[in-house]
Image (cartoon, rainbow, N blue to C red):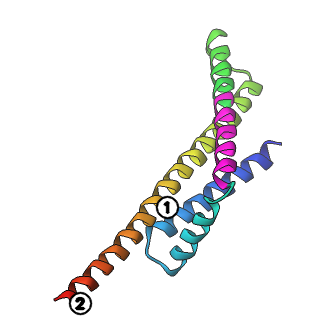
Amino acid sequence: MFIEMFQLLFTIVAVEAALILTLGFGTPVRRVVVKLLDLLKQGRGPLVTKTVAATMLVLFGSVLFSTIQINTRVSESGGVANPTDQVMFANRLLESFLMGTVLFLALVMDRMHYYTRELQITRRNLEVAVKKTKTAA
């Protein structure tokens, strides 16, 4: 169970990092990514995205709580952890780190898409204003 979830979370992190890099540099793929993100943010896309993000946030909180419980149990027993607690703690810690990373990268990707879109609109408006001043002069 843990292996499949870790593979999924690592895949999501890799895809989000690739999209952020694509949005960060002016490559031809950038226009396609911006168009796809525009399509994703239309219709029911925002509702689905917010639902998934809220679910991941609740899971993130649950995993953090479980990690804190394991840590408290270990500290109450005199600082000696049995191997089962060590494995559970390591798995929960990795899981919480990956979920937090996924949520953070999703936020970064959303903001980068917004600023890229605003930059395109501003450039288009600037080009229109320059053309108007050239024709008026």
Report which residue position mark 1 lands on.
113
State yes or no: residue 52 in magenta: yes
Which residue of the protein is positioned furthest toward the front in this rendering?
A: 136
Which residue of the protein is positioned furthest toward the right in this rendering?
A: 1
Q: Which amino acid does label 2 sit on?
A: Thr
Gap between marks 1 and 2 measured at Cα: 33 Å
Report which residue position mark 2 lands on.
135
Q: What residue type is labelled 1?
A: His
Q: Is residue 130 left or right of residue 29?
A: left
The crowd level at tag 1 (other Cα within 10 Å; few <14, some 14-19, many 20+) is many
Magenta span: predominant SS is helix
Query: Quadrant where the C terminus lies?
Result: bottom left
> Above or below — where is 8 with respect to 81?
below
Task: State the image coordinates of residue 108 (x, y, percent, origin top left).
Answer: 49, 52
The crowd level at tag 2 (other Cα within 10 Å; few <14, some 14-19, many 20+) is few
**Residue ID at (21%, 83%):** 133
Please state which of residues 3 and 21 is positioned toward the viewer in this rendering: 21
**Residue ID at (69%, 43%):** 51
Task: State the image coordinates of residue 31 (x, y, percent, origin top left).
Answer: 52, 75
Task: State the image coordinates of residue 81 (x, y, percent, origin top left).
Answer: 69, 20
Element type where label 1 sits in the image: helix
Sequence order check, earlier mark of 1 and 2: 1
Q: What stretch is highlighted in magenta?
A: 45-62
Task: State the image coordinates of residue 40 (x, y, percent, origin top left).
Answer: 64, 61
The image quarter in which residue 67 lies: top right
